[in-house]
Amino acid sequence: MDLADYRQYLVEVNSDTQSLYDHTILIGSGLGLVLMTVFPAHSSRVAFIAWAIAIAMVLVSLDTSTRAFSAVIKSIDDGIEIDKTFYRLTTAFNYIAYVACVAGLTCFVMAGGQ
């Protein structure tokens, strides 16, 4: 794959990422609404705070991912070394989202037993 093909591939993947961003907002918001409505007895403040943090980190991660793609495309266009700052940020936000999601689900399940 030459550089022009790689650049085109990055542009297409970046476009797909924007679509995922929209879907994540809709699915995450819907899930929160369903959980609060269907299982109000299971609701604990900690669970919903952790869930909100997880959703926020997913959204921030998708944003930094888009910025990472843009940085790589710009690096290819300018012929300079690729800056991996946004890649590292995306990875960190993904880990935070995962931990917060697991913590929120654990709190939600534990609150249901009370």
Image: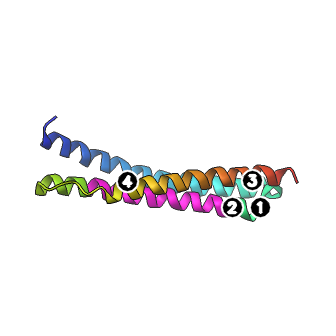
**Label 1 – label 3 distance at C-alpha:** 6 Å
Please state which amino acid type lies under the numbered disc 3: Phe
Residue type at mark 2: give it.
Phe
Residue beneath label 4, please?
Answer: 18
Cβ–Cβ under 8 Å for marks 2 and 1: yes
The verdict on residue 106 being magenta is no
Q: Are circles 3 and 2 on residues that touch, CB within 8 Å?
A: no
In the rendered image, which quarter contains the C terminus? bottom right
Q: Which residues are magenta?
A: 49-70
Disc 1, disc 3: CB below 8 Å?
yes
Q: Position of residue 89 (x, y in %)?
A: 40, 59
Q: Position of residue 104 (x, y in %)?
A: 68, 55
Total numbered labels placed on residues in the image:
4
Residues at marks 1 and 4, CA–CA distance in whole angstroms: 32 Å
Q: Which residue is mark 3?
A: 108
Residue placed under numbered mark 2 in the picture:
48
Callout in the foreground (3, 4) = 3
Which circle's residue, 3 or 2, is located before the other in the chain? Answer: 2
| Amino acid type of the residue that numbered disc 4 sits on in the rendered structure | Gln
- Residue at mark 2 to residue at mark 1: CA–CA distance: 7 Å
Ranked by sequence position, the earlier of labels 1 and 4 is 4
Q: Position of residue 56 (x, y in %)?
A: 53, 62
Q: Earlier in the sequence, mark 3 or mark 4?
A: 4
As measured in the structure, the alpha-carbon distance from the residue carrying label 3 to the one carrying label 4 is 30 Å
Identify the residue at horizontal 45%, vertical 61% (top origin).
60
Residue 59 counted in the magenta span? yes
Q: In what element is the residue under mark 1? A: loop
**Residue 44 - label:** 1
